[in-house]
Amino acid sequence: MSIEKMRVAAKAIQDVVATAATATQKVVEAIQDAATATLKVVERPNAQEQKRKQTQGDSSHNRPALAPSPKKSSVSVALCLIVPASVVRNIIENDTIKISNIEILIENASYFLCTSPEVADTIQQHLKLTTEDIKDVSEQREFYVRINIADGEEMMGKKVPYILKRNLPSNGQGLVGQLACLEYLSVSGLENFNRV
């Protein structure tokens, strides 16, 4: 390669390097400008807040009241149990029942289900219930007990009695919505329940 061609090539390389350096410098400057602008935007609310405090003062009566946090909506569930008559002798329909007594019912249940009241209504229609008085049946006869519990969302759909008991609301009580004797040896409708 002749010296003249080498000079031309070297000059071309120098031009490319200079152009690249200029472009890189412009990119760096653009980034710095963007960072400065962002910093100004971030700092501006703080400056405005200080100015507001100076004009209004920092007394608590000038601050707007905080809106109350929305209450967590309670979810009612229907706890449906099949238990022996001996366990429900002291339970009265449409009466309140303590959590400790609900635990005893769960411990003695042969079938159980915890679901929404609407689903419980449907399932209850398939059960064969009688109007027999609890005083007139043997202690081994099975009774259907439905307890409506507020704030029972943690119980919904649980399939193990221990977990069901553990998720009972710690403070509160239930309402005995239904108490009826199951037709002797009937299993109709129990396919929807969990068997212990």
Image (cartoon, rainbow, N blue to C red):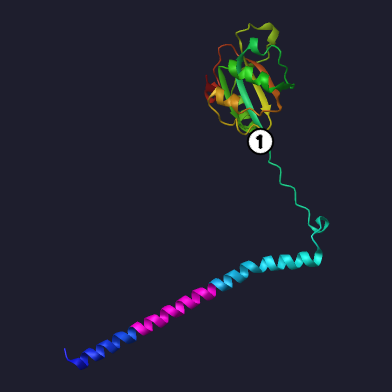
Q: Decide whether residue 27 is among the magenta residues.
A: yes
Quadrant holding the N terminus: bottom left
Seen from the viewer's position, the closer of residues 165 and 149 is: 165
- Along the viewing direction, whichever of 176 and 42 lies nearer the viewer: 42
Residue 47: percent from the left, percent from the top?
A: 69, 68
Give how far across and how far down residue 178 sits, in percent: 68, 21
Image location (x, y in percent) of residue 43 = 64, 67
Identify the residue at image location x=55%, y=29%. 158
Q: For the image shown, how many numbered marks are present on the structure?
A: 1
State the SS at label 1.
loop
Residue 117's place in the image compared with 188, above or below, is: below
Q: Residue at x 71, y 46 (%)?
A: 70
Q: Nearer the viewer, residue 31 or 194?
A: 31
Q: Residue at x 53, y 76 (%)?
A: 33
Q: Tell me: residue 152, above or below residue 88.
A: below
Magenta span main SS: helix
Q: Which of the 4 quarters of the picture holds residue 17?
A: bottom left
- Relative side of 89 to 9, left or right: right
Task: Give the residue pinned by disc 1.
Answer: 75
- Seen as rendered, the residue at the extreme bottom is 4
User: What residue type is disc 1 on?
Assistant: Val
Q: Which residues are magenta?
A: 17-34
Determine the image quadrant of residue 193: top right
User: Horizontally, is 17 left or right of 73 in the view?
Assistant: left
Residue 169 lies within the magenta run: no
